[in-house]
Image (tube, helix red, strand yellow):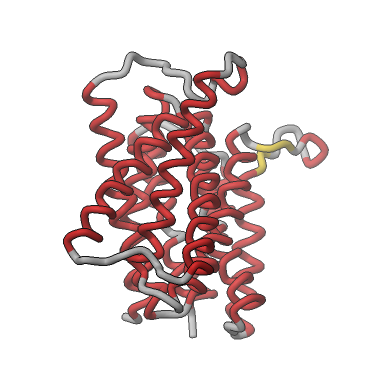
């Protein structure tokens, strides 16, 4: 199995498991609190790894700035994704965000000069149609078509930012080690997320307050879920970044996008969520398109 496919699938497994923990945590603590908690956990762990391995941040000012910008994009992506998971439904939001793999392929071709075969291009088109069908509910005919839920808006923002972040990571990792880049990026992520929690908490606005709203009292169990999500996130990110260092960007990005499939199976099988037939068809189309893209 190609190393790019292997590392991408490893990241998919970690992130798919993280999604469920993040969604459960968001409903107890609020999406901003969970975002900050997950970022803080992974940042602390990355700092510890960097200390143990004697790995400093990038010495080049340009790389240092690029890493910080990637951290900013990552903070926005995680916040949008966790907010979408909180207001749900989980299965729809996860299915939408899976499209970042297809978008990553397009961006890798445009900005990194990577190439696709004809079959892979057809697969990308099929996956795109599948994503649309997954995200749209057909109630009362085509004229009554509407977005399947408010979480979809946040999912679109997240998928774009995740794809941009992937291509950016690949470009910067080429010039430095993956750990150095992730170290700066994740510290910035954590700082922005913690600042967002403080800022929203200081502004008494109903709409902003919903992001830190707690439906349940905070408990040790709630924060344990956040800790688990942070560990899973870092595991996926480390495997993902290593894959970007040693393999093609489009292959790693595409394989990692199967993470939400894990979330969808758990959401439908264990959390009682239901998909419409057209949305099941959309998910199948996304899967078929992704397989075609991955073929040589």
Give the farthest residue toward the left: 52
Q: In the image, 268: left or right of 218?
A: right
Residue 150 seen in render: yes
Q: In the image, 6: left or right of 286?
A: left
The spot of residue 275 in percent (x, y) is: 52, 39
Say which of 4 and 51 sits in front: 51
Q: In the image, 12: left or right of 222?
A: right
Residue at 36 percent across and 66 percent down: it is: 180
Say which of 208 and 153 sits in front: 208
Residue at 43 percent across and 67 percent down: it is: 255
* 117 w.r.t. 72: above or below: below
The spot of residue 88 in percent (x, y) is: 52, 33
Residue at 39 percent across and 76 percent down: it is: 245
The spot of residue 270 in percent (x, y) is: 33, 35
Residue 121 seen in render: no
Say which of 209 and 97 sits in front: 209
User: Residue 155, located in which quarter of the rendered image?
Assistant: top right
* 118 w.r.t. 143: above or below: below
* 35 w.r.t. 124: above or below: above
The spot of residue 170 in percent (x, y) is: 48, 72
């Amino acid at each position: 199995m190609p190393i790019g496919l292997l590392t991408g699938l490893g990241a998919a497994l970690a992130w798919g498991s993280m999604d469920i923990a993040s969604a459960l945590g968001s409903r107890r603590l609020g999406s901003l609190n969970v975002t900050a908690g997950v970022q803080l956990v992974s940042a602390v762990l990355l700092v510890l790894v960097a200390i143990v391995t004697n790995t400093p941040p990038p010495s080049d000012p340009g790389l240092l700035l690029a890493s910080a910008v990637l951290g900013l994009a990552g903070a926005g992506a995680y916040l949008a994704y966790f907010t979408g998971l909180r207001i749900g439904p989980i299965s729809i939001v996860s299915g939408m965000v899976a499209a970042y793999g297809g978008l990553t392929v397009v961006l890798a071709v445009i900005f990194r000069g990577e190439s696709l075969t004809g079959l892979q291009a057809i697969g990308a088109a099929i996956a795109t149609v599948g994503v649309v069908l997954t995200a749209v509910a057909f109630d009362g005919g085509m004229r009554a078509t509407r977005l399947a839920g408010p979480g979809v808006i946040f999912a679109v923002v997240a998928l774009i930012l995740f794809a941009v972040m992937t291509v950016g990571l690949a470009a910067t990792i080429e010039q430095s080690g993956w750990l150095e880049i992730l170290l700066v990026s994740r510290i910035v992520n954590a700082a922005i997320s913690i600042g967002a929690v403080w800022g929203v908490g200081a502004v008494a606005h109903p709409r902003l307050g919903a992001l830190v709203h707690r439906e349940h009292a905070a408990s040790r169990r709630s924060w344990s879920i956040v800790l688990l999500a942070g560990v899973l996130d870092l595991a996926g990110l480390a495997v993902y970044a290593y894959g970007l260092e040693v393999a093609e960007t489009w292959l790693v990005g595409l394989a990692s996008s199967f993470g939400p499939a894990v979330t969808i199976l758990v959401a439908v099988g264990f959390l009682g969520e239901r998909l419409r037939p057209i949305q099941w068809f959309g998910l199948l189309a996304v899967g078929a398109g992704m397989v075609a893209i991955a073929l040589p």
